[in-house]
Image: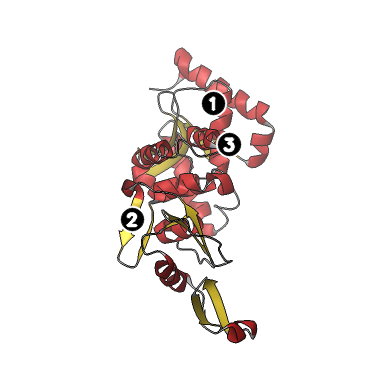
Amino acid sequence: MDRELAAGRLISLYSGVLIPAGKPIDLSTLVTAARLVDPDAVVIGEGARSLGWAGNPVTSLRLASKRRLRGGTEYLSFTERSVPLDFVIDREEVRFTSPEYTAVDLVPTHGAGAVIELLREARDRGDACLSMMWQALATMRRRPGIAQLRHVLRECERRPWSEAERELHNLLRSNGFDGWEGNYRIQLEDTWVLDVAFEEEQVGLEFDSRQFHSDSASFERDRLKVNQLQDAEWKIFLVTSAMLAEEKQLLGWISRALGRARTGKRRK
């Protein structure tokens, strides 16, 4: 065995778990290897994100285990941790943390990215998803960096679907704006979702990004959306990254629009 390892004809996924060098090291192979080491271990981190909602390829797995497993390889590593059963998804071949637990668990390495990504995936159940994230956080009380986890969830309390939306939400909060909702659903001729909506004043903010509006179909749909909203007497501001960086002008537009609406000049 040692000679085969030294010659590169075998690969060690973990102590005592070997595979032929030509065998693909995919998620299925890694999960099978992990079960041989500890059948009760729970996949956490990026592997759980892949299993839970992202479906992205992974080349290594981190797992939570109640055992004191020593060592690790570039393919498998174990950390001594007990994950509450309420946050474990148990498929016959693999156990992994729930999407809500996983998103919070990834904050130290991904910042708000995984939380935002999951909120975007959840969409229609955003409030319930966020509530479950707070419950998952409550099980991590003794974890180092808990303040960062709380901070990220507070920043995402109005369900941003992108990093740009999170920045916009932070800008509104830090400047004392209230009475607004993130990803507000409105039914007109079609059903639309406004990035930010001051419902009472009928003032909306739409983030205009080349990343999400680069193809012709998206371009046409966005213009239809704005036209229907304006026809329904909504005041719509298109927001770009540059406007967020130079916030004074944007804040002035919003303040004046809300001021006019609140003094009775908004059309009924």
Under mark 1, the amino acid is Arg
Tag 3 secondary structure:
helix
Under mark 2, the amino acid is Ile
Q: Position of residue 14 (x, y in %)?
A: 52, 70
Tag 1 secondary structure:
helix
What residue sits right under mark 2 in the picture? Answer: 89
Q: Residues within 10 Å of mark 3 (few under 14, many from 20)?
A: some
Q: Residues within 10 Å of mark 1 (few under 14, many from 20)?
A: few
Mark 3 and mark 1 lie on one chain; the one further toward the N terminus is 3
Q: Quadrant of residue 11?
A: bottom right
Residue 178 higher or lower than 10, as above or below: above
What residue sits right under mark 1 in the picture? Answer: 173
Instruction: Please tell me which residue is depicted at 54% across the width and 33% down the height of the picture.
Output: 147
Check whether the beta carbons of the residues at disc 3 and disc 1 lie within 8 A of each other. Answer: no
Structural distance between the alpha carbons of marks 3 and 2: 32 Å
What residue sits right under mark 3 in the picture? Answer: 167
Q: Position of residue 244 (x, y in %)?
A: 64, 35
Under mark 3, the amino acid is Glu
Residue 13 higher or lower than 90, as above or below: below
> In this view of the protein, which residue sits in the foreground, 257 or 176?
176
Structural distance between the alpha carbons of marks 2 and 1: 36 Å
> In this view of the protein, which residue sits in the foreground, 147 or 67?
67
Tag 2 secondary structure:
strand
Mark 3 and mark 2 lie on one chain; the one further toward the N terminus is 2
> In this view of the protein, which residue sits in the foreground, 231 or 245?
245
Mark 2 and mark 1 lie on one chain; the one further toward the N terminus is 2
